[in-house]
Image (cartoon, rainbow, N blue to C red):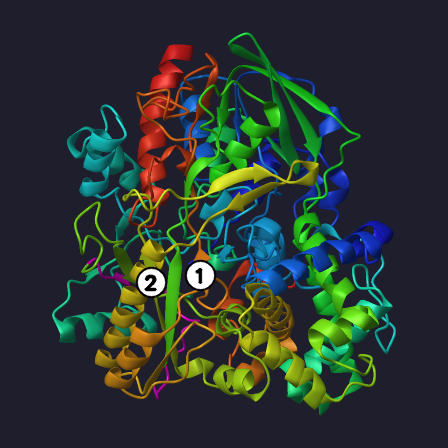
Amino acid sequence: MRPDSTLLPKQSRRRFLTHSAMVLAAPAASSLLVGCAGPSARDGGGLQAREFDTSSPFVRGIYLDEDGSRFFRAASLAVLPELEQPDAETMDNHLRQVDTAFVAFGPVTQNEFAALLSLLTWAPTRMGVAGVWSDWETASPAEVDGFLSDWRNSSSTLLNAGYNGIVKIISTSYYGQPENFAKSGYPGPPAFATSSLPQFQRETAV
Amino acid sequence: MSVQDVITLGLERGWAVYSARPESEIDNANRDFIKPVSSMREVEFDVIVIGTGAGGGTAAETFAGQGLSVLMLEEGRLHSLKDFKMEELWSYGNLYQEALARTTEDAGISIMQGRSVGGSTTVNWTSSFRTPEKTLDHWAGAHLVAQSTPSEMRSFFENREQRLNISPWAGLPNENNAVLQRGCQALGWSTSLIPRNVLGCWNLGYCGFGCPTNAKQSMLTTTIPAALDKGATLMTSVRAERLMQVGDTIRGLVCHPVAVNHEVDVDSEILLKARHYVLAAGAIGSPAVLLRSGVSDPHERAGKRTFLHPVVATIADMGKPVDPYYGAPQSVYSDEFLWRDGVTGKMGYKLEVPPLHPSLSAGVIGLHGEELMDRMRMLPQMNSVLALLRDGFNDESQGGEVFLRDGGHPGLRYELNDYLWEGARDAYLKMAEVQFAGGARSVRLVHLDSEDYSSWSAAREAIEAMPMAAQRTKLFSAHVMGGCAMGENPREAVVDSYGQHHQISNLSVMDGSVFPTSIGANPQLSIYGLVYRNALRLAQQLA
């Protein structure tokens, strides 16, 4: 599945650059995703037959390759500055969740995002369109924040869509994880329900 | 109260349930009872129903009740109470189309659609409205829909209300809904309680993740178990690839196994046959089957005029606990502006609230950095109001178009125009006004250019100047309708007023895709009532 779904190189890059050229000419409709969220890694939605990388640091996943992982590590720190404080494991779990979400999205969104990642991880376009001069491993949080803000405030619908898509997959993956519920003050499912419903009991009675 | 897993109990009784992709069932709690499709002996049926949502579930029970042999096909998997643990991310990945990442082609509108046995009824928020009389009258006049006047439809809605225990919510609205109720009352706007399809509801708030108590009277817990008890067969993890047309009839259906994440196993073919074929794959799925099949469509109507009830939303800081993730998600609505400029004038809208769980909320807020984290910290005191914009009633609202992407995956093109933006702006104004009237401390739009406004006058001034554009104005949809329109004029409609295909003798469409416009209300009861009537008639013809 990997080579097919990561699809980074030329074809998709060319495709996004075509889009980018349209942006320069006139604000064009994008074909980027504004995804919402993905599955939990609890059981991978039937996907767990594939191997998840559980090593630390997270280097690559099923969908994300090394470049894509580096980008999401940097972007996640800018979207969620609090990720920096706790520990490496929290970031690794988060990136694993982002990767799991991408797998679950399926071919349409995977292909759209491959085009975006291709643009963002190829140095000339990273500098030209994202305005980030350092590579993602060394870019400062301020630099990454500047890139996100530029895309948010841009008059280009395409860049707005890129911003919305990047921010959405990172934030929905993060806040949906039970270990991060406290960050939004969400107490989780009501205890009276989990303590009495059969599916939460160790021996599921029906 | 004891809670029974009706699916597991039925499987233990020997229901005929097969998976086209047994390897997908490895983590399914009911895997021991789900048979591989290779062990299925019967491949010819009276009726094949493609899809198990509001339309397919209703049709399947009706056919099985008339003694017909029925095969139900579902591209998602069969889940049950065992899997419904109030987990947001698990649900999005397993119970929604494209793991909730489905959007229109330009990503201008995010689309929430169900994808498991029960379709969207497994994950909807239970709001159950009859088709508005104005909508039915408009269909009769503008779209030549016959025998579907409010008085002709009444008994079918009543029947489904009884079958699915639909009645106005009898409990207290949760605080999220109470904000809308209080605001409407303070402003003198009409407001009522929402009828819900629940029986013994625990008022938990997790309808969107698969009801954890089986209280929701979805297709998963009502009509589908009933059909299976009457001998119907269910096949999951299967995509209806193409109908094989010979002359004016369908002679077979070619299917492929499909994974949870939509990867289709094109090397494996399953050939199925029936006397009659019923499309109920939803308003994106049903036109997609027609387009993939190249079924006769002399006037090129398949996939045209697809409607979404585009949704705009606002969020408010109420300054006190709201807990918008707990309690019946939707119990209060206002139709004050649904027909604000008549049926065919400016775009009207229905006001409701959405439940706010953390992942979805983060996606809706859509910011980054401290701005995002600050908003998320106030989730427990957040209220949100949404407006369902009624599309398809005006010449400037022609809806979208379903098309096929590489690999036969469906896409939806939907143009955003000034007619829609006028409605969106008006809705933003009314939503902010009602939130302040309901006690909000500050309000912001779900819009890239919004700030937090601390008074109604500040919000009004900002909204009047707010740029309306794709991606900046965040739009959502949970109601995909149209694309296989019904009506007596074959030049405009795909099927007749009973769902019978205009060109093909043994093909019907029985789901929300037959609506010639949007509904102007959450559509599930509209689908139940219409499909029940049409399936009864077809069953009598086939019996």
Q: Which residues are magenta?
A: B317-335
In the drawing, does residue B376 fall left or right of residue B485?
right
Q: Quadrant of residue B237?
A: top right
Between residues A204 and B365, which one lies in front from this camera angle?
A: B365
Q: Looking at the picture, how far across and down is residue B227, in whole percent?
A: 48, 29
For label 1, count other residues whose C-alpha is less than 10 Å away and answer few (under 14), some (14-19) or many (20+). Answer: many
Label 2, label 1: how many angstroms apart (C-alpha)?
Answer: 9 Å
Between residues A166 and B520, which one lies in front from this camera angle?
A: A166
**What kind of residue is marked 1?**
Leu
Q: Residue at x 37, y 20 (%)?
A: B490
Which secondary structure class fits the magenta region best?
loop
- Residue A110 visible from this viewpoint: no
**What kind of residue is marked 2?**
Ala
Q: Mark 2 — residue?
A: B424
For label 2, count other residues whose C-alpha is less than 10 Å away and answer few (under 14), some (14-19) or many (20+). Answer: many
Q: Looking at the picture, how far across and down is residue A29, in whole percent?
A: 55, 56
Chain to which mark 2 belongs? B
Toward the left, the furthest residue is: B188
Q: Quadrant of residue B16?
A: top right
Toward the top, the furthest residue is: B247
Q: Looking at the picture, how far across and down is residue B68, in whole percent?
A: 47, 17
Q: Mark 1 — residue?
A: B475
Chain to which mark 1 belongs? B
Q: Looking at the picture, how far across and down is residue B106, in whole percent?
A: 55, 54
The kind of secondary structure element at disc 1 is strand
Whether B186 is drawn above or below B510: the answer is below
- Residue B39 visible from this viewpoint: yes
> Do labels 2 and 1 touch, CB within 8 Å?
yes
Q: Quadrant of the N terminus of chain B?
A: bottom left
